[in-house]
Structure formats: C-alpha cells, structure tokens
Image (cartoon, rainbow, N blue to C red):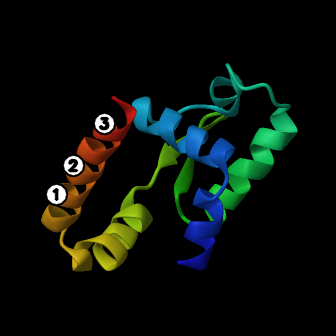
Amino acid sequence: MDEVFKALADPTRRTLLDRLFENNGQTLGELCERLNMTRQAVTKHLKLLEAANLVVTIWRGREKLHYLNPVPIHEIADRWIGKYERGRLRVLAELKKQLEGETNG
C-alpha cells in the first residue's frame, strides 16, 4: 500500500490516472499529448504506477497499451475511508462548505 500512496502523491501521476479513467487503453504517445514532458519522463511515471499496480500494460501488436487498475484505490477507500463512514464525512464536508460560504460571503 505504501507504493500506491507514493504513486498517488505526485500530481503528474494523478493526471495520468485521470486520463486513463477518461479513456482507458492508451499508448505512451497518447498519454504524452497535452503534457509538457518528455516521453522518457512520462515513462518513468508510468513505471512507478505499474510498480504500484495502478496501471497494467498489454501489448497489442507493436503497441503497448496502458490501462487503469482501480483495485488498489478501492482497497485504500475501503481501509481508510470506509471505516470512517462515508455518510458522516459527507455531512461534515457539506457543513465545511456552508461555513466557508458564510465567511467568504
């Protein structure tokens, strides 16, 4: 689980996961689009995501496709969020928004 937290700590890696969530099964070239990074830098991020089991790759001919594996994130949610009861957290989050609105308005 430490590898998952380490992988999720970086905003670029979270962006890559978001892009795979939007359109699963992308090549390295597709993932590099709209990122101001070299292919080598994106490859390093993908390797960390693969090591954390957040990304799985499958070869289709000469193309290497990257897929999001949501299982580790689900396990984190079950362990770290589920036990604190989502309902109560939702109520607290709504209260916080209301209070912030009152102080800003």
Residue visible at 44% across and 29% down? 23
The mark nearer the N terminus, 1 or 3, is 1
Q: Position of residue 97 (x, y in %)?
A: 29, 44
Residue visible at 79% across and 50% down? 44
Q: Residue beneath label 3, please?
A: 101
Above or below for 45 versus 2: above
Q: Nearer the viewer, residue 90 or 19?
A: 90
Q: Residue beneath label 2, please?
A: 94
Neighbourhood count class around disc 2 (C-alpha, 10 Å): few under 14, some 14–19, many 20 upward: few
Q: Position of residue 47 (x, y in %)?
A: 72, 56
Amino acid type at circle 2 is: Glu
The quadrant of the rendering that contains the C terminus is: top left
Which of discs 2 and 3 lies nearer the camera? The answer is 3
Check contact, mark 2 vs mark 1: CB within 8 A. yes
Above or below for 1 versus 98: below
Residue 95 left/right relative to 24: left
